[in-house]
Structures are given as C-alpha cells and as structure tokens.
Amino acid sequence: MLETIKNLIYPPKCGICGKLNKKYLCRECKNQLENCAICEILENRNPYILFDEQISIFSYKSLIRNEILSFKFGEASYLYKTFVNFLIKNQKVFQKIKSYDIIIPVPISKKRKRERGYNQSLLIAREISKNTNIEIAQNCLYKTKNTIEQSKLNREEREKNVQNVYTIKNEQILENKKILLIDDILTTGNTLNSCSKELKKGKPDKIGVLVLAKD
C-alpha cells in the first residue's frame, strides 16, 4: 500500500533519461547500458588480493562513468534502482549473487555521509537484498576515519589512504558465511582489499565483491 502511494506521488522513471518506466530503465537506455556491460565474474588468483571473487557489471567508461559520478557526487541517488534493475536481468550474475549468505556495503565515514546524504553502496545493497532476500549486515563493518577521495590520488597514495580505516564489529555473524561486499567502482582494489582484511577476522567461508563498474 505504501509503495503504491509512493509511486503515485513519485512515479517511477528511467534513471538515465527520466521517462516514466516501472522498471526504472527504459528500453533505449537499457540498450545503451548493454554497450558498457561486461557482467564479469572472476575468481581471484592473486595472493595479494584478499577477496575470493569479483563480480563487475560495467566497464567504467562513457555513459556509465558519467552516470556513476552523478550517482556518487551529483545527488542522483535514484540511480541505484536503474543499476540494480539492469544487473538482476543478467541470469549469470543474478544466480551468482544468490549463492551468497550476507551482503555488506562498503561503509563511508560519518562526515562523508553528512555531506552526501547517503551511502551509495548501501542503496545498491538494499535494492539487491529486496530482490534476493539476502540479509544485509549493516552493523558489522565501519569506517573510522574520513579519508581523501580515492579518485583524487595516485596508485601508491590510494593504498596508504585506506590502511587501518575500517574496523569490524559483531564478527561472529560472519563465521562460515559467504559474504558479498558491495561497492560502486573498482580501480586498484585497495578499498575492497582493506575491507576484506577486516572481514576475514570473522572467519567467513568466502568473500566476494560486487562492483557496478571496473576501471
């Protein structure tokens, strides 16, 4: 009932072009997203990477780059529905996501949350949880320091920037679980590696990462 009322007040629109669309993604824009889609699932074989599996939906270029920057910095929070509605239509990706037990969004600092008004990774996580019934563990991974945006740093600076800035609580809920860590962009992987290092303290069975785009 509440969802119906909400849709009457704020009718669902395609997040890319703004046309009315119940799935938040019209056919024309879906075709554009497909040109950027890679829907890649990779098993990690690098000993320096601490997560076991990587799922990437798009290549970080052209339309996707612009839309993710708007999503992250331009107050276009509504785009999470468009992105998730696209990725769940890919059966390979959707079935892989459903093999996980717990979803954890990469956290942001309290200061960043106040500035932005939302955590973009949490919005994605909630929509995926809604479509899969996989539990979100929000009270588990925390960011304890406000850091410089990774996009403003070079490769060496990025690694130092995210060292010792995440901490884990309630780690017992992770034991023997398959964890899906969610973020927007993967470039060097330092943020996801730092988060995974903390999550491993909970002795999970597996850590996978899902990113909207890979740079």
Image (cartoon, rainbow, N blue to C red):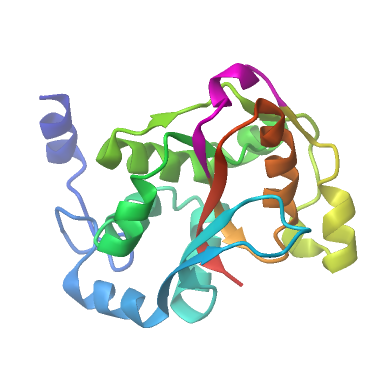
User: As displayed, is residue 45 above or below residue 203?
Assistant: below
At 89% from the left edge and 60% from the top edge, which residue is drawn?
Answer: 157
Which quadrant of the figure has residue 199?
A: top right
* Closer to the camera in the image, 19 or 126: 126
Q: Position of residue 2 (x, y in %)?
A: 16, 25
| Residue 189 left/right relative to 82 | right
> Which region shows up in magenta?
168-180
* Closer to the camera in the image, 172 or 77: 172
At 83% from the left edge and 63% from the top edge, which residue is drawn?
Answer: 153
Residue 102 visible, this angle = yes
User: As displayed, is residue 65 above or below residue 202?
Assistant: below
At 73% from the left edge and 65% from the top edge, which residue is drawn?
Answer: 188
176 in the magenta segment: yes
Counting every numbered tag in the picture gives 0
| Residue 93 left/right relative to 113 | left
Which quadrant of the figure has residue 30?
A: bottom left
The quadrant of the picture occupied by the C terminus is bottom right
At 62% from the left edge and 35% from the top edge, which residue is drawn?
Answer: 113
30 in the magenta segment: no
The quadrant of the picture occupied by the N terminus is top left
Q: Position of residue 130 (x, y in %)?
A: 29, 36
| Residue 151 left/right relative to 23 | right
